[in-house]
Image (tube, grey):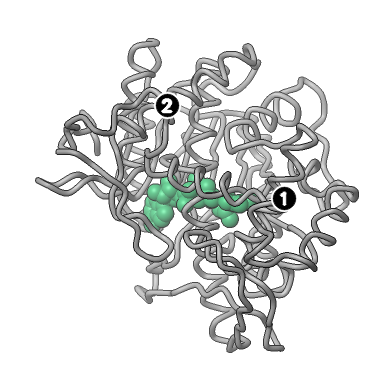
Amino acid sequence: MIIEPRMRGFICLTSHPKGCEKNVLNQIDYVKSKGAIDGPKKVLVIGASTGFGLASRITSAFGSDAATIGVFFEKAPAEGKTASPGYYNSLAFEAAAGKAGLYAKSINGDAFSNEVKEQTIDLIKADLGQIDLVIYSLASPVRQHPVTGVLHRSVLKPIGDTFTDKTVDFHTGIVSDVTITPCSDEDIANTVEVMGGEDWAMWMDALLNAGVLADGAMTVAYSYIGPKVTEPVYRKGTIGMAKDHLEATAFKITDDLAKIGGKAFVSVNKALVTQASSAIPVIPLYISLLYKIMKAEGTHEGCIEQIQRLFSARLYTNGTIPVDEKGRIRIDDWEMNPEVQKEVAELWKGATTENLTAIGDLAGYKSDFLNLFGFGFDGVDYAAEANEMVEIPGLI
Ligand code: NAI
Ligand code: NA
């Protein structure tokens, strides 16, 4: 069928298989263009189909010839209905990996469940024996707890005070005030259950106990800090409590991995347009101002540039891994540059519907958003019939 973007709220209901393929191939080309990394050889990526996780899988495979297992939760295609973009991304990734002679298999299911953890361990045992890197890159609004069965929902709310500030509807470009009332204590607990570190620790525990972690294995999860303007809804809000928990969990996991000499890290990444971040109020306005400034100074990066730099300049330099005073890897260094932040703060004050296209990179935001779903790529004929029913061979 002919596939066009169909927007509803913060999501796009359709995705384009050829465009998603193009997105993946562009990322592969980028990683190859940066040269070989003396990196991991057998990698598990949890949340491997989009955003930072997909970039981690691509960097592992095409930067250091790694075998990869990807875990994700994506919608397969149905007659007349496209798959979710992560499904097509993974299909394209596996095809490219296969062509390059690289092992790649994927598991589509709920990573929070015991079943998916068991399936993953069985697959590692059968095919790879042991793995040397685990990337934890889940972003989800819900988690069914594997022990209690409770379905926890995360919320994006301030703690204590009502928050009012600017936001932009990136579809229309309209800048307006958004007011978010403070969360309840339950909201904090639920958000920590979903986006905190418990599931990461459960994964590492299960992998360690199954004997599928190689000596010196490393695991990395992703976090975010960001600017003052987003603090009440992000870092000091419910999601920030979850990120605090995730960051603290890294130390616990490192302790648990002592017997194999393993280590857990959190990497603080840059704000980027992904399905997860588009849904957070205020962030899209911040991102559009940030992009404008970083593109002008030549320091703008997307997920693939971020993760390629994480692997080549932080994780696998053959030296010590540099961390901040809280033990975190910082690859948000260019975003958090005080000069950049000062400029964003100034632009923020004066941002309006009328001037945003000039002072911000709304076009860049929109184009990145469309790209997430495989739309807007050069070299893809969107007027042509596309086969939405393509399937990932051997998907578990
Ligand atoms: P994303 O939405 O692009 O990717 C989420 C991934 O998780 C997908 O592969 C999805 O299939 C998978 N997933 C979700 N629920 C699942 C489940 N129940 N079972 C199995 N897989 C599931 O998100 P993004 O932005 O790449 O986020 C990844 C991590 O990076 C998150 O921890 C996020 O907080 C962090 N981060 C994001 C930033 C941003 O600006 N986007 C900035 C810094 C950190
Ligand atoms: Na991801």
Residue 243 left/right relative to 187: right
Question: Seen in the image, is 325 located left or right of residue 313?
Answer: right
Q: Residue furthest front?
A: 354
Which of the two residues, 278 or 379, is positioned nearer the viewer here? 379
Quarter of the picture containing the C terminus is top left
Mark 1 Cα shell of 10 Å, populated few (<14), some (14-19), many (≥20): many
Q: Which residue is the extreme one toward the left? A: 79
Residue at the (88%, 51%) spot, across then down: 325
Which quadrant: the N terminus? top left
Amino acid type at circle 1 is Leu
Q: Position of residue 173 (x, y in %)?
A: 55, 61
Q: Which mark is residue 290?
A: 1
- The answer to whether any part of residue 111 appears in the image is no
Against 183, residue 386 (above or below) is: above
Where disc 2 sits, the SS reads: loop
Looking at the image, residue 335 sits to the left or right of residue 306; the answer is right
Q: Secondary structure at mark 1?
A: helix
Q: Can you tell which mark lies on residue 230?
A: none
Residue on which the image places disc 2: 378
Q: Using the numbered discs, state the Cα–Cα distance from disc 1 to disc 2 in whole angstroms.
A: 25 Å
Q: Position of residue 94 (x, y in %)?
A: 34, 25
- Position of residue 182 relative to residue 376, above or below, is below
Which one is nearer the viewer's eye here, 364 or 231? Answer: 364
